[in-house]
Amino acid sequence: MIPDELKAITDAETEASAKVRCRLNVCMAAGCQSCHGDKVLKALQAEVASRKLEGVEVRGVGCLGLCAEGPLVLVDPEHVLYQRVQAEDAADIVAALGGKPVKRLVCSLETPFFKRQKFIVLENSGKINPERLEDYVAHRGYEALATCLTERQPPEVVAEVLASGLRGRGGAGFPTGLKWQMVAKAAGPKKYIICNGDEGDPGAFMDRSVLESDPHRVLEGMALAGYAVGADHGYVYVRAEYPLAVKRLNNAIKQAQKAGLLGPSICDTAFTFNVEVRLGAGAFVCGEETALIASVEGRRGQPRPRPPFPAEAGLWGCPTLINNVETFANIPPIMREGGKWFAGIGTEKSKGTKVFALAGRVCNTGLIEVPMGITLREIIFDIGGGIPEGRKFKAVQTGGPSGGCIPEQFLDMPVDYDSLAKVGSIMGSGGMIVMDESSCMVDVAKFFMEFCRTESCGKCVPCRVGTAQMHNLLSSICAGTATMDDLALLERLCDTVKFTSLCGLGQSSPNPVLTTLRYFRHEYLAHITDKRCPAGVCNIHSLAEVHA
Amino acid sequence: MSTAIITFIIDGRDVSAREGQTILDVARENDIPIPTLCSLQGLHPVGACRVCLVEIKNTPKLLPACVTRPSEGMEVITDSERLRQYRKTITEMLFSERNHVCAVCVSNGHCELQSMAENLGVTHVRVPYLYPRLPVDATHARFTVDHNRCILCSRCVRVCDEVEGAHTWDMQGRGVDCRVITDLKQPWGTSESCTSCGKCVHVCPTGALTEKGKAVAEMVKRTQFLPYLKTMRESWS
């Protein structure tokens, strides 16, 4: 496919949409589908058909963001959002088209939840049908790929990513441009691109939403990466627990191949790029790049020591570029609008936006995209709408099992890689779990440690034994049977596991304990010395009760 | 064949490495002791036990000597109070993980875990014992695997795969539930891939893999065959 053909698709789409008087966009991402969004779509289609309405299109789109109020339906061109729609509401919604909206279902789009966000990665999410290539192309999809292949040299593409200041969105925040440069410079006839979609943090669903809502964007980002570093083959590693994302991704790959946007001679150039999907079998550790590579190779998903880094010796020993789903999703707009444009968004050291999966004790749970540097307070209280039932905020957990719990005094801290690291947490892949006064911080630390214990691959001693031992100690603190010696041992184990483990999973597993010890030590002490759980979560029996 | 020589520093001593050598290789050549467990000369290093971690000047992370290759001018520290504490804690973790009771073990006095603990001055295990209930597989005619004494170093898995070429051994499970297994977790005695060569028994650092008929402290392991085999094969190819 050449740029002219892309334009032809865009024109045809524009022409077709000119005939559509009204569009009913039904969210078909996993969140809304789980509360029967698919039934709403069918009911609306049946209603429109039975009324024989002309120029009304009912279609499924990607995530509309406010997952808490699903199923969501967005009506265009009126731009009215309906929330908690059920199949029975279809008649009312269709009847109201062109007139006054159905009042009982309307969700205001003027709230900070929608107004404070900035969409780059999610620019098409909820706007296009993720199952149609034409929709993506009509929204300037594959434009960046076609332009780069025909007008720009690979080093220019790398330079553009460098200029953007984009940092890896998988968690560690390594500068993406530098990684691309390393792989581009690495010697070897064969190189690979891997897209890491093994999102496993509890409460995180950013990658899933991107893959479900706009799969072509990720493929375009990967193809651009392939062109920039000289790779002709890519793998998308997605966890098998995301069947919808996998289905849409496979569908997108087929469409792109058919359209000549993947495969041999893309855009009539010598550039060839193929993409295959690999499914993860449910191991969290496979999100670690070397374990992921082992898994793609068909071996046991266990990390290996780095160096050598995948950029030098990765998949089958070849130089491999491995980036997260969200990182690749940032590439097409960067190439389209320029690295300078991207660098103008965010803070000095953290550029662009970040997608967060807002979850836990917050009114508006859902998927949000915000510019870097926004404060936690803005995210939780403006966009998130604060804590439900008038309860008091206690802490926010970022970065999943590898991250930490950030207390109230840091709410006005800007959200960027370095600030989060300074308070003992990490940016992580974007899970954000809000906790209120009803959460016991020792119990929270125990939860994450249990996760790490079961997800440790067992290869290195500190992580394998350390996580089990730390989990036992946290359990006994929660049960009120621990002593101050146990607390000292817990701290010693945290230190050992953090500095001696082989991979990121082990090295970061003590973070939830370390941050809760730093900011909520009094809760640990209450459990140990007063035999009492301040939040009333842990079931502590007094000695008298035990002996009774 | 010309090989590049790298000069660097271990514990204040100037040392030189040939291309492809690890910090551990060079340290051994210079009689600088670094404790190891999973590493064994002649087997592919995996960097799993973490007792060979060393400090490298101007690097925030500790790196395993068995897999890390030196670079020109690098300053390596193999012994410090911090490293000693970590090594001790890791050793204690290993003791706490399974049911290591030296006094009744066939490998008593010939066990790498035991001698490492002695060298590191581990007088007490300050981490609570986990006391898992683990089986013993004595179905093989000549050998026994006692999971209570296994430290999951994966030497048996590697020697069987890399040297014997049988790949009878593998690892199953995750975290503390990991076990070494024979043939998709079949009893060792029924294994069709096992050649009964006994290499796994002799590379095992503890009393987990032993020959039958040995009483307490009688099981002496002989690992000398490995570097010999490796050199022979390299000279053939």
Image: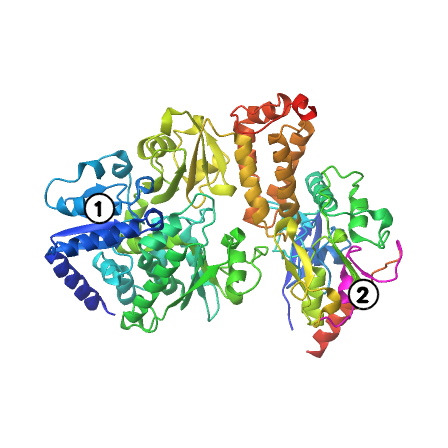
Number of labels in the image equals 2
Q: Is A178 in front, or is B135?
A: B135
Residue A150 visible here: yes
Which type of secondary structure does the marked residue at label 2 adopt? Answer: loop
Q: Secondary structure at mark 1?
A: strand
A68 over A441 or under it: above or below:
below
Residue bounds of the magenta highlight: B194-217
Residue A350 among those drawn in magenta: no
Task: Tell me the quadrant of the picture where the N terminus of chain A can be found.
Answer: bottom left
Q: Horizontal and vertical percent for residue A382?
A: 31, 31
Residue B173 to residue A434: above or below: below
Q: Which residue is mark 1?
A: A74
In this rendering, is residue B197 above or below B130? below
Respond whether the residues carrying marks 2 and 1 are from the same subunit.
no
Check the picture and name the quadrant holding the C terminus of chain A: top right
Tag 2: Cα neighbours inside 10 Å, few (<14), some, or many (≥20)? Answer: few
Name the colour scheme. rainbow
Q: Which image quadrant for residue A261?
A: bottom left
Q: Nearer the viewer, residue A390 or B156?
A: A390
Horizontal side of A528 relative to A386 (left or right) equals right
Query: A264 or B187, which is in the foreground?
Result: B187
- In the drawing, what numbered circle is on residue B224? 2
Amino acid type shown at disc 1: Leu
